[in-house]
Image (cartoon, grey):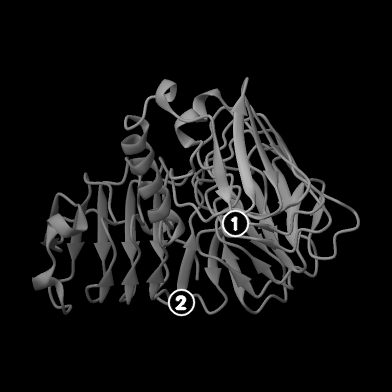
Amino acid sequence: MNCAMKRIFCILLCILFSGLVPAAAAEETGICGDNLSWTVDDGVLTISGHGEMYWYDMGSAPWYPLRQSIRRAVVEEGVTGLSYCCFFYLTELREVSLPGTLGSIGGMAFYGCRSLPEVQLPAEVYEIGEDAFYSCLSLSAIHVDADSSAYSDDEGVLYEGTTLLCYPAARGGERYEILPGTEKVAVCAFSYSSLEEIRIPESVRSFDTTALTDCYRLRSVEVAWGNWYYTARDGVLFSGDLQTLICYPAKKSSGSYRIPAEVKNVAIRAFANNASLQKLEVMGSLSSLGSLAFLNCGALRRVCFHGDAPENVGFSPFPGNTRVFYRIERAGWETVDAGNWNVKEVAAWTEDTVLVPQQERLTQ
């Protein structure tokens, strides 16, 4: 499940689970592994014993119904593995203590722990699952024990070897330069950060298309000269061959934009949360238009396609108040359904159609 869709699913699931079991009726002790037990006492969740935790899905950990009362989590020595979603949406969790015996942390383990300010990772941790710290809105730093051979941190930014895993949402700062030598930027790595500028070094070979999801203050992305895999034009991030538009920053202030003719793919949520964009021209023929590509682009009123209809269109790409226009001589438009695209109308282009002014177009 991709990052964007996973987030929506998680929110819906939390709403569902929130009313199922009253906190007063929940158990306050139990088993959470073949040799592990748990208790909640006076706001402290304690996990003790030896070995790995049982596997839990979103909202299924036995202490989840007590989540609003849990403010501290203590994982005692002897515990070697934390489950997927083990602390999922413990929104009041403010402190966590992890043991030196801990080796693995499951994906989405701290997902939605919105009050947690920092995490200290022990030296023996060798595996951290995807989105482990996603939506931790108060998280300012992830510190790694200096003796760790698998992970490190750059003043609180988490790295695994040459992979940037997580820039904490509350770390602060307006600009961040990814460390030289970094080769990969992981799923949702910068999500919810307050950064305005990000610089990608020459060394990066893989930049996940969801890495900049929900960066509401982002104004510009810069790519170092010599990077063959990625490029930036006027602060907009593309693949090196310009075939994929990855991120149009949420705080980019232009009212109009022209997608270059070379672009064949618009990534999932590529333009999401931009409140300034009003008019858009798509100069070429797209192969794919990603799900929620223009999510929360409330000012976008008009999109004009110069090429054929996109071959593959994801879930609800437009914000609902947009009108789409196309050149009547181009192929595939007769089968496009406005409802599936979440637009007001899909209509043939006429001379009266308002396009992006020539002077506002990017020079290619």
Residue 60, image quadrant:
top left
Q: Which residue is mark 1?
A: 106
Q: Nearer the viewer, mark 2 or mark 1?
A: 1
Residue 328, image quadrant:
bottom left
Residue 208, image quadrant:
bottom right
Q: Which residue is mark 2?
A: 243
Is residue 40 placed above or below 171 in the rendered structure? above
Is residue 352 placed above or below 205 in the rendered structure? above
Q: Residue at x 45, y 52 (%)?
A: 57
Which kind of residue does numbered mark 1 sit on? Gly
Q: Is residue 319 visible?
A: yes
Seen from the viewer's position, the closer of residues 222 and 229 is 229
Mark 2 and 1 residues: CB-CB less than 8 Å, in contact?
A: no
Determine whether, in the image, residue 113 is placed left or right of residue 261. right
Give SS at disc 1: loop
Q: Residue at x 43, y 60 (%)?
A: 361
Determine whether, in the image, residue 123 is placed left or right of residue 8. right
